[in-house]
């Protein structure tokens, strides 16, 4: 790996801000392609991937990486041509070529955006085909419908005949795993599977993939996840569960995407929107400075103090309680100051869960947690030390009042200097794949804020003039999603098999079996004379009934044989006069009402698709009779196949009801034709 930058020029490949495995892997792969000497231009996109300049190519991560990627790079960084943005020459006139992978908008480049103005040629390689680029400097633009950009790069490396090192193959495999959900996301294609297989053939380490592919959450991420689960708000619209959470943090928190994904799975939500608001002036890069300031005697973080004060102010007594207290004889004494102390005392008492007359560290942490305020252990320690002026390990009421007054004064001074408090809002969205969420496209929803990503996984960063605007923005996103993407679910009556053939309780095994064979079905409802569902018969019941009939026939044969032996031996044998009639009755079998499934589950025609799926799962059956709402009147049948048609998993499955989609009258010409052709059937 070349580390020095030659004076005659160089190339740079950029990942997007907070690089994930797909962005990093494709950047490293593109750098390898540009550094190769193969000048074959066999297709129209070759120019985007090939470089004949023989200049070294470096990979730059504009603004860090996800925690899992950082962990991987801690051991592997020296194996790839990665440089920091600051290490590039101040004179960028020798920048020959600039590549952007998994990014096609300026705001995704962060502090590296200025490189666009110096590069002689700009290349964009992306797999978000519905995205819109705002980079007119791009000379080459390649976007293909695959699950990951790493797949596109891996295919070019394979076609170029380039061999990968084990670390490069492992990184490409991690990139494909990350953006395809290990080939489980609905955006995955056969090309992704092929590229992953090639990376494995090139020596990708499965041990490294197993360790780094699904890394555990860091303590900071775990804290965010805990607060998210505590403060999640959930609503259900058209059978889709939408969960949102609005949190406040001291500064930028890395790795929120993994937190949002875990929250989606743990809450059993269909859509999860994780929103974190932090002070625009505070970020991850300022944390060390903040710690130094606190060590030197600084009395805590202003943002955290202000948020805590705001939450405590909300906890004053209700209007009825306050008016009741004002009715006492001495309530008016002391004026506004006394009233304020009473309100703060009410807030203090509510937070004093154990009634000790003091606030302990755990009770302060509970206030922050229940209010959606993300606070690190060090920040909580500093805040508690600020409040605990006598250092006795607990907060009495006078210390509480002093803290509130100081926080109120600081907040007033800050607003006088800067007006409303500016903040940054990060929105991370995740959608569970399913028939009810197939129209949800987070990429389009977030584009209005300059964000984007995939249809089911996207993010956006919004600059707020006032932190209070965050709730309105989040509510607006949910409202737009409901209006444009969440359609009313189809009911069972919309896709059931209807009209449907049914059986009568007086039918025998042979009658039912003939219907099964003739119409190629495996189950039929049983109805009475009023068309009310009274049972269900499947091929299992028919098989069992036939077995019982066969057993009876064998028993009869044995009895007749014994009877014949007795007659031959001259024994006195009595025969029943109606033996032949009884034999004919036995040959016909037993009535269906004696062996059908009774007390079967039915589903009303107005039930949604999700509800009937749950009903089939709970009952562990493959079909259910559909009845008119509020009655037992049979109107159709719903089967697993009907549900599969609605999911549209398989192109080869007919998406119209096959068995009884047409009425008997409509099928009559076909039935008559079959009868005429039957005489031409070959004898077996």
Image (cartoon, rainbow, N blue to C red):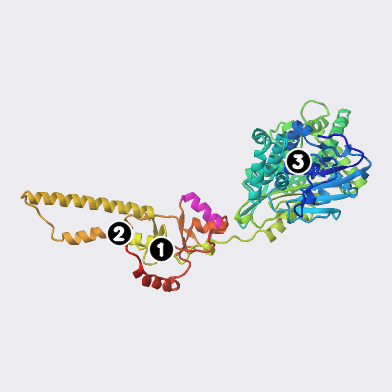
Q: Nearer the viewer, residue 232 or 178?
A: 178
Q: Residue at x 81, y 30 (%)?
A: 385
Q: Residues within 10 Å of mark 3 (few under 14, many from 20)?
A: many
Q: Is residue 350 visible?
A: no
Q: Earlier in the sequence, mark 2 or mark 1?
A: 1
Residue located 75% across and 37% down the image: 348
Q: Which mark is residue 275?
A: none
Q: CA distance from mark 3 to mark 1?
A: 64 Å
**Is residue 168 visible in the rendered structure shown here?**
yes
Q: Number of callouts in the render?
A: 3
As measured in the structure, the alpha-carbon distance from the residue carrying label 3 to the one carrying label 2 is 69 Å
Judging by the rendered image, the residue that carries numbered circle 3 is: 373
Figure check: 119 above or below 668: above
Q: Is residue 584 above or below residue 311?
A: below
Which residue carries the number 2 mark?
A: 591
Q: Is residue 618 magenta?
A: yes
- 179 over 646 or under it: above or below: above
Residue 519 is labelled as 1
Which numbered disc, 3 or 2, marks the residue that appears first in the sequence? Answer: 3
Q: Quick one: quadrant of the N terminus?
A: top right
Q: Is residue 480 magenta?
A: no
Q: Nearer the viewer, residue 205 or 109?
A: 205
Looking at the rendering, the stretch of residues picked out in magenta corresponds to 607-620
Compare residues 53 and 280 and report the one nearer the observer. Answer: 53
Q: Nearer the viewer, mark 3 or mark 2?
A: 2
Q: CA distance from mark 2 to mark 1?
A: 21 Å
Q: Is residue 383 above or below residue 311?
A: above
């Amino acid at each position: 790996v070349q580390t020095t930058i030659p004076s005659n020029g160089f190339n740079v490949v950029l990942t997007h801000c907070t690089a994930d495995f797909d962005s990093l892997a494709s950047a490293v792969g593109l750098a390898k392609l540009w550094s190769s000497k193969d000048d074959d231009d066999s297709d129209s996109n070759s120019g985007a991937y090939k470089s004949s300049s023989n200049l070294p190519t470096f990979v730059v991560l504009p603004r860090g990486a996800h925690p899992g990627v950082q962990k991987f790079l801690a051991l592997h960084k020296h194996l790839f041509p990665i440089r920091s943005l600051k290490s590039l020459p101040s004179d960028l006139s020798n920048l020959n070529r600039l590549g952007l992978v998994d990014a096609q908008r300026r705001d995704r480049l962060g502090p590296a955006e200025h490189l666009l103005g110096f590069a002689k040629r700009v290349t964009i390689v992306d797999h978000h085909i519905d995205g819109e680029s705002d980079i007119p400097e791009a000379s080459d633009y390649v976007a293909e419908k695959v699950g990951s950009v790493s797949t596109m790069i891996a295919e070019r490396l394979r076609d170029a005949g380039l061999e990968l090192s084990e670390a490069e193959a492992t990184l490409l495999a991690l990139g494909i795993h990350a953006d395809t959900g290990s080939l489980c996301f609905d955006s995955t294609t056969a090309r992704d599977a092929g590229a992953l297989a090639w990376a494995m053939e090139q020596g990708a380490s499965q041990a490294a993939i197993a360790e780094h592919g699904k890394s555990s959450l860091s303590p900071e991420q775990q804290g965010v996840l805990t607060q998210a689960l505590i403060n999640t708000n959930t609503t259900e619209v058209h059978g889709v569960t939408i969960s949102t959470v609005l949190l406040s943090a001291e500064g930028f928190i890395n790795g929120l995407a993994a937190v949002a994904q875990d929250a989606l799975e743990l809450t059993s939500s269909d859509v999860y929107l994780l929103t974190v608001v932090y002070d625009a002036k505070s970020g991850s890069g300022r944390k060390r400075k903040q710690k130094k300031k606190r060590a030197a005697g600084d009395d805590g973080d202003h943002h955290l103090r202000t948020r805590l004060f705001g939450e405590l102010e909300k906890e004053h007594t209700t209007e009825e309680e306050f008016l009741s207290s004002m009715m006492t004889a001495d309530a008016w004494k002391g004026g506004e100051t006394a009233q304020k102390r009473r309100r703060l005392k009410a807030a203090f008492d509510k937070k004093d869960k154990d009634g000790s007359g003091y606030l302990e560290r755990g009770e302060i942490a509970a206030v922050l947690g229940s209010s959606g305020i993300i606070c690190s252990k060090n920040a909580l320690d500093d805040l508690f030390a600020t409040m605990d002026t006598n250092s006795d390990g607990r907060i009495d009421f006078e210390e509480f009042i002093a803290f509130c007054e100081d926080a109120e004064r600081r907040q007033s001074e800050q607003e006088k200097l800067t007006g409303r408090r500016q903040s940054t809002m990060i929105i991370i969205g995740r959608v569970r794949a399913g028939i009810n969420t197939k129209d949800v496209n987070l990429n389009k929803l977030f584009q209005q804020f300059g964000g984007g990503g995939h249809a089911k996984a996207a993010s956006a960063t919004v600059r707020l003039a006032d932190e209070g605007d965050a709730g309105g923005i989040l509510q607006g996103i949910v409202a737009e999603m409901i209006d444009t993407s969440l359609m009313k679910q189809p009911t069972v009556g919309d896709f059931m098999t209807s009209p449907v053939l049914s059986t009568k309780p007086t039918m025998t095994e042979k009658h039912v079996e003939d219907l099964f064979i003739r119409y190629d079905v495996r189950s039929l409802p049983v109805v009475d004379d009023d068309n009310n569902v009274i049972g269900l018969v499947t091929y299992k019941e028919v098989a069992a009934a036939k077995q019982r009939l066969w057993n009876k026939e064998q028993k009869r044969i044995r009895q007749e044989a014994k009877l014949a032996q007795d007659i031959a031996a001259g024994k006195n044998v009595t025969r029943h006069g109606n033996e032949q009639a009884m034999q004919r009755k036995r040959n016909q079998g037993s009535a269906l009402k004696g062996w059908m499934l009774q007390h079967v589950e039915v589903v009303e025609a107005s039930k949604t698709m999700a509800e009937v799926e749950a009903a089939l799962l709970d009952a562990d059956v493959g079909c259910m009779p559909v009845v008119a709402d509020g009655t037992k009147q049979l109107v159709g049948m719903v089967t697993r196949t009907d549900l599969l048609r609605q999911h549209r998993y398989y192109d080869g499955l007919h998406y119209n009801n096959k068995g009884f989609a047409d009425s008997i009258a409509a099928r009559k010409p076909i039935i008559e034709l079959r009868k005429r052709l039957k005489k031409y059937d070959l004898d077996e």
